[in-house]
Amino acid sequence: MELADELARLVELPSVTGREDDVTHFLLEAWADRVDSARVDRAGNYVGLRRGSLPEGSLRVLVAAHVDSIGMMVAAIEPGGFLRAVPVGGVDGRYLLGLEVVVHGRRPVPGVVGARPPHITRPEERRSIPPVAELFVDTGLPEGEVRELVAPGDPVTWRRPLLRLRNGRVAGRSLDNRAGVAALGVVLRELRHLDQAADVYAVGTVGEEFGGMPGARAAAQAIRPHVAIALDVTFGSHHGVTDDHFPLDGGPTIMVGPNCHPGLARFLREVASAEGIPYAMEVSGGSSGTDAWVMQVAAEGSVTGVVSIPLRYMHTPVEVVSLSDIRLAGRLVAAAVARLDEGMVREWTSLS
């Protein structure tokens, strides 16, 4: 499956935090020929393994990309069949009014986020953003049928298929972090043509968007990686915003900061230069805000790095990303993983 087609399929699948099964089971099938074995663990993570040339367990590398996305969850069914919903993850109410959605009940139910018409809205209301919890979803169905199909706790996603823009760019919902998942797929494709010493665990993690990162924590505790790399997105520069943002089509970013091991960050830069892969340095003085935050300290700890893909309009229904940046991020991580050896990791830290 071509990258753009795989990304479109990933975007199409619902995967609100806590309900990621559709994506993880898709990966079991779509990536079957890229790994030696694969499973979904008890936490709900996709875990694919490519064996390396070293004896089993001698050098373990975990490459993670979270498969969950922001969305909403049905909180109540009100008289008339209208649905109240609560946000899941960092949802901004500015982008929801008038949005087409899908309620994932006993079957998918299309709906819209209703809003009071401007004709009957008070002036002060027009100048404010209604809290997400005050918005409602209208499915057009009578209350009785709504109650048969929908229950509190059912996820709600934006109805927004992938839109192919010019110059190899695409727009759509959930590209945070379907772009990273697609890059992880590129890593596995590239490794089929490379010789790696390490056992490489490709993990589609669950639960990242609500902040607890339980999927990454569970995977790292179980795998006990010597090296762990998070593949995620970062802020892409766009009109009127340049500070702490990165251009599209300029390649991935390599993070430096307390959440990233300096030896691994330096190695990633060296590999990028050797492979002719453009990149930018991303400086983070605290938590990376990625799965690397928990992978760094899980079990006995790991040498941790973050490679990110610039993304415009993060946490909106029209996130924009460059397919080229996704490919380059995957190529970089694959090339780095293929060059890792025990001696290199031993230089950075104690290998056990």
Image (spheres, grey):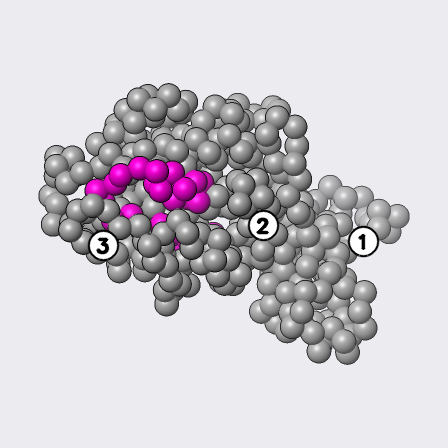
Q: Position of residue 113 (x, y in %)?
A: 73, 55
- Disc 1 to disc 2, C-alpha distance: 34 Å
Q: Residue at x 53, y 40 (%)?
A: 3
Q: Nearer the viewer, mark 1 or mark 3?
A: 3
Q: Which residue is mark 1?
A: 116
* Callout 3 crowding tier (Cα within 10 Å): few <14, some 14–19, many ≥20: many
Q: Nearer the viewer, mark 1 or mark 2?
A: 2
Q: Which residue is mark 3?
A: 224
Magenta-colored span: 183-209
Mark in the foreground, 3 or 2: 2
Q: Is residue 37 left or right of residue 69?
A: left
Circle 3 — which element?
A: loop
Outermost residue to the right: 119
Give the residue displayed 65% in from the left and 52% down from the top.
158
Query: Where in the figure is residue 279, as x and y percent of width and height?
Result: 40, 25
Q: Amino acid at mark 1?
A: Arg
Callout 1 secondary element: loop
Location of residue 134 (image quadrant): bottom right
